[in-house]
Image (cartoon, grey):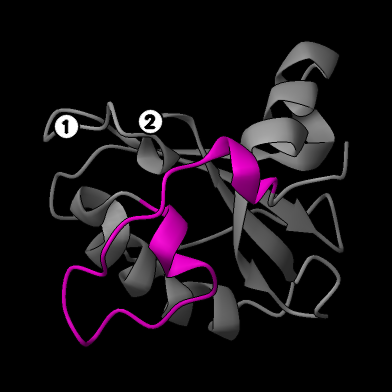
Amino acid sequence: MKKYNNFDLHFTFDRKNETIGFLHAEYVHPLKQELVQAFQRDFQEDGNIKAAIVFGSGVEFRCNSYSDLDLCIERYDVEKPFSYSAGETGEGVDVLYADRIGERLRREIEEKGIVVYDREGCYV
């Protein structure tokens, strides 16, 4: 199985509105699309972000208004934290670093995660 973007395991969703334009938006639940769109600026402004992967309920049909957004971040410099402004309006966001997660969670993210930002085009 390839790393990330195993589209055959996911639903395809409609885009919530015309402002949603991030990578693979159709695989992110509409309830989380605006939040992921808001993160795009943070990803672009932080030159340390290699890729951002949404996983968990945010890419599943079971997502609801109480679901948080699970993000896995791949960084160039593993010592530099990711600082972001998106999601500060009380929306739940869990940011995990790919270099700091256990093997079981890593396998789940690699199998079911959807890349929503890819600086180098490695996962397109």
Which percent across, then down, holds residue 27?
A: 45, 55
Q: Earlier in the sequence, mark 2 or mark 1?
A: 2
Image: magenta residue range: 6-28
Amino acid type, mark 1? Asn
Left or right, 31 with reference to 95: left
Residue 1, quarter of the rendered image: top right
- Residue at position x 24%, y 66% in the image: 34
Reading the image, the residue beneath label 1 is 64
- Tell me where residue 30 appears, x and y as whole percent: 23, 55
Residues at marks 2 and 1 touching, judged by CB atoms closer than 8 Å? yes
Can the viewer see residue 11?
yes
Q: Are there few (<14), some (14-19), or many (20+) residues within 10 Å of tag 1?
A: some
**Pointer 2: residues within 10 angstroms few (<14), some, or many (20+)?**
some
Report whether 63 appears left or right of 124: left
Q: Which residue is mark 2?
A: 57
Q: Is residue 22 magenta?
A: yes
Front in this rendered view, residue 37 or 26: 26
What residue is at 69 percent from the left and 52 percent from the top?
5
Residue 86, by quadrant, is bottom left
For the point 76% across and 36% down, the residue is 110
In the image, residue 17 sits, relative to residue 5, either above or below, namely: below
Q: Quadrant of residue 106?
A: top right
Q: Quadrant for the C terminus, please.
A: bottom right
Marks 2 and 1, how far apart at CA: 8 Å
Is label 2 in a helix, a strand or a loop? helix
Residue that appears at 86% across and 60% down: 77
Q: Is residue 106 magenta?
A: no
Q: Is residue 16 left or right of residue 107?
A: left
Mostly what secondary structure, the magenta segment? loop
Q: Which amino acid lies under the numbered mark 2 shown in the image of this protein?
A: Ser
The kind of secondary structure element at disc 1 is: loop
